[in-house]
Amino acid sequence: MTAAPVLTTERLTLRGWRDTDRAPFAHMNADPVVMEHFPAPLTHAQSDAVIDHITAGFERHGFGLWALEITRTGTFIGFTGLSVPAFDAPFLPGVEIGWRLAATAQGHGYATEAARRALAYGFQDAGLKEIVSFTTTTNHRSQAVMRRIGMTRDPDGDFDHPVLPRGHRLQRHVLYRIDAPTWESTTR
């Protein structure tokens, strides 16, 4: 379905999306635990639209949000990768690293492991100079992943997400950054 480069880690495969990913992805996006830091769970149609948007991103940029599977079992567990945010904020344009994992895959270090590989692709293969990440102020687990992969919080860059209505419980977001030289120093 997607002509995306295949990336591997010790336990994981980051790959292009397949039609067989649609049902488990929709199930994952309907889970209130997985979607706790998003405005609402997604319908199956909305989830399919996300996959379609992701695959278009690979075609446009040469990178994107890879489907993530456990290599040993072939089990689809979510996504990790790079995307170009489609809203206006002071730190944009830029490239974001992000992840979303099924509830059963959380707490095993998969997000950190896959994100490290996606950062390597972004800096080494795509030639990016900087990668950002952002999440709600209450999403402490994702913030911990950001720190584990070497990102630093930029409090001056914290922002109210423009696609959320004013006063929404998730509107305030924190911003993390990492540039190529900093990433290179953490890989030695």
Image (cartoon, rainbow, N blue to C red):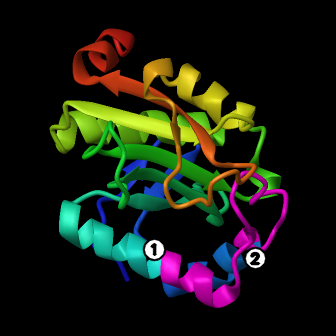
Disc with the residue nearer the chain's start (1 vs 2): 1
Helix, strand or loop for disc 2:
helix
- The answer to which quarter of the image holds residue 20 is bottom right
Q: Judge the density around disc 1: few (<14), some (14-19), many (≥20) Cα neighbours within 10 Å.
A: many
- For the point 28% across and 16% down, which residue is it? 184
Q: Is residue 121 visible?
A: yes
Q: Which residue has dot 2 on it? A: 27
Q: Judge the density around disc 2: few (<14), some (14-19), many (≥20) Cα neighbours within 10 Å.
A: some
Q: Which residue has dot 1 on it? A: 17
* Residue 161 to residue 181: above or below: below
Q: Are marks 1 and 2 in contact (CB under 8 Å)?
A: no
Helix, strand or loop for disc 1:
loop
Q: Range of the magenta residues?
A: 28-50
- The percent coordinates of residue 139 (x first, y second) are 71, 38
* Residue 101 to residue 10: above or below: below
Outermost residue to the front: 166
Mark nearer the viewer, 1 or 2: 2
- The answer to which quarter of the image holds residue 92 is top left
At label 1, the amino acid type is Trp
Is 36 magenta? The answer is yes
- The percent coordinates of residue 161 (x first, y second) are 53, 49
At label 2, the amino acid type is His
Give the CA distance from mark 1 to mark 2.
Answer: 16 Å
* Residue 32 to residue 11: above or below: below
- For the point 26% across and 31% down, which residue is it? 130
Report the magenta stretch's main SS: loop
